Image: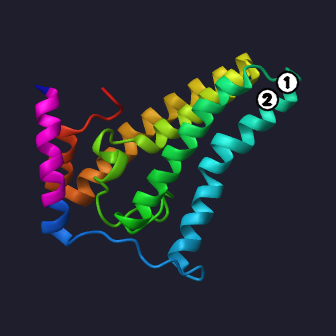
Amino acid sequence: MLRGARASWYGTDRHLTTACSGPRRAPPLNFRSPMLIRAIAAFVALPGVVAFALPIAIGISTGHPVHYVTLAALPLCLGAMLLLWCVREFYVAGRGTLAPWDPPRHLVITGPYRVSRNPMYIGVLTILAGWCVLWGTRTLVAYTLLFFCGFHLRILLFEEPWAARQFGAQWQEYRAHVPRWLI
């Protein structure tokens, strides 16, 4: 039944995107565009620090040797690709950035957002899992669990209520058909 609901949502998704505000096309890449600069700055400031700078610093500071490099590369690469895809969807479909101070102007229901309402967080957590495999430290596991709890609370307390106020009925329909995480 869930698959049927999700499959019908995909059809509705295209209809909503076209009927409500027209198809989303990528704005031309103008490297002087204030929105592109804000999107890049938000990426570096938020997931760049949380998913890369801090875990690498933790991993190096523990003094543990790296393990399972090939195995760790899989979640690191998949998480990074998912994260970049999400940032692109926010920029193209949402006309905004991932930063709370410059959120999307349109509800993003395309790309990985068809499968989960929070694929960006899934991407970050997948990257963090890769660092855990690479260094195998309890500190990184605790860091990952701390961020999972923080992400979940942020979604429940801030992001979902904001989306309900901002996007109204479109958010409610999207919420009814697409899971918060993956299930």
Residue 139's quadrant in the figure?
Answer: top right
Q: Distance between the residues labelled 1 and 2?
A: 6 Å
Residue 14 image point, x, y percent = 18, 57
Q: Nearer the viewer, residue 175 or 26?
A: 26
Q: Which residue is drawn at 34% across and 51% down?
A: 111
* Residue 140 appears anywhere in the view: no
Q: Where is residue 62 in the image (x, y as percent from the top left)?
A: 85, 24
Element carrying mark 2: helix
Residue 13 colored magenta?
yes
Expressed as whole percent of the image width and height from the top left, the position of residue 99 reads 51, 58
Q: Which amino acid does label 2 sit on?
A: Gly
The secondary element bearing badge 1 is classed as helix
Report crowding for label 1: few under 14, some 14 to 19, many 20 or more residues within 10 A (C-alpha): few
Residue at position x 33%, y 46% from top? 113
Marks 1 & 2, CB-CB < 8 Å contact: yes
Q: Choose between 7 and 120: the one closer to the eye.
A: 7
Q: Quadrant of the C terminus?
A: top left
Who is closer to the viewer here, 25 or 148? 25
Q: Can the viewer see residue 145? A: yes
Q: Is residue 135 left or right of residue 32?
A: right
Disc ID at residue 62 = 1
Query: Which residue is drawn at the image coordinates 54% and 65% (left, top)?
Result: 39
* Residue numbers of the magenta segment: 2-15
Residue 89 image-quadrant placement: bottom left
Would you name the residue on which mark 2 appears? 59
